[in-house]
Amino acid sequence: MPASSVQNSFRCAALALLAVLCCQTAVAADPPGYTLARQGDSHDFDFLGGAWTTVQRRLKARNVGSQEWTAFPANLCLTHYLDGIANVDELHMPTLGRRGLTLRTFDTEKRQWSIYWVATPLGRLDPIPVVGGFQGGRGEFYGEDKDGDQPVKVRFIWENLDANHARWAQAFSYDDKTWETNWTAEFTRSDPSRLCDQGRPRRS
């Protein structure tokens, strides 16, 4: 075989191998469903306005295959702003002695929600939001963060179950292949006059 033909054969084989490796890398880049392009509507979170009692469940240890959960109650009050394109809720976790605040903003050009979180005692706003929107009664929101020093992909799932019930779940992906759900919440609508004071959960 002429030297030029050998070189061409090696070149073709190298290009084919490179293409396979690139495709494998692309396939393995993100866990199932992960996207930063999901869109929604400015009224996606209208259902969440008002007051809610919740049962929170949090995984005791993440990324170790744990099946042990801690359950605790929490009360949530949510207020809409700017004709609904922004909202703020405060979550009071009395048995933990903690509070958390969620800020959601809707980009009317991108048609996309961004969700930010800050909690006591540190009071640090997570600067990178999860983004997305609802399709029907289910909302999906994705982003990137760190669990300690380890980079993770993050997924929020919101479900508007009916007029008086909702569900939320948070999951992390450590390997870009699978999701581990580590926090869930079941919501039941409550009376704002009993549960909230000027849009914030009453301290009991």
Image (tube, helix red, strand yellow):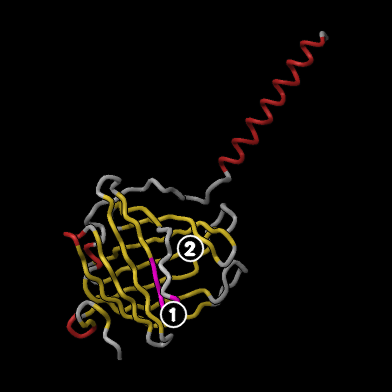
> Residue 147's x, y, as percent?
55, 65
Asked if 97 appears above or below 144 in the picture, the reply is below
Q: Three-letter amino acid code at disc 1?
A: Pro
Q: Quadrant of the C terminus?
A: bottom left
Q: Secondary structure at mark 1?
A: loop
Q: Is residue 6 left or right of residue 127?
A: right
Q: Three-letter amino acid code at disc 2?
A: Ala
Find residue 13 and report its image quarter: top right
Please give the name of the residue rendered at 20% of the width and 60% of the height, measured from the top-left corner.
84
Residue 80 falls within the magenta-colored stretch: no
Please give the name of the residue rendered at 29% of the width and 63% of the height, measured from the top-left corner.
160
Asked if 104 appears above or below 95 in the picture, the reply is above
Q: Is residue 89 left or right of residue 127?
A: left
Please give the name of the residue rendered at 41% of the width and 74% of the height, measured from the top-left corner.
123
> Residue 186's x, y, as percent?
36, 73
Q: Nearer the viewer, mark 1 or mark 2?
A: 1
Find residue 9 and report its image quarter: top right
Q: Would you name the residue on which mark 1 appears?
A: 121
Please give the name of the residue rendered at 56% of the width and 42% of the height, measured from the top-left corner.
27
> Residue 92's x, y, as percent?
34, 81
In this picture, which residue range is highlighted in magenta? Answer: 117-122
Which of pointers 1 and 2 lies earlier in the amino acid sequence? 1
Find residue 28 and report its image quarter: top right
Q: Residue furthest top?
A: 2
Which dot marks residue 106? Answer: none
Q: Quadrant of the N terminus?
A: top right
Q: Would you name the residue on which mark 2 appears?
A: 171
Q: Is residue 163 left or right of residue 186?
A: left
Q: Secondary structure at mark 2?
A: strand
Residue 118 falls within the magenta-colored stretch: yes
Q: Nearer the viewer, residue 173 or 92?
A: 92
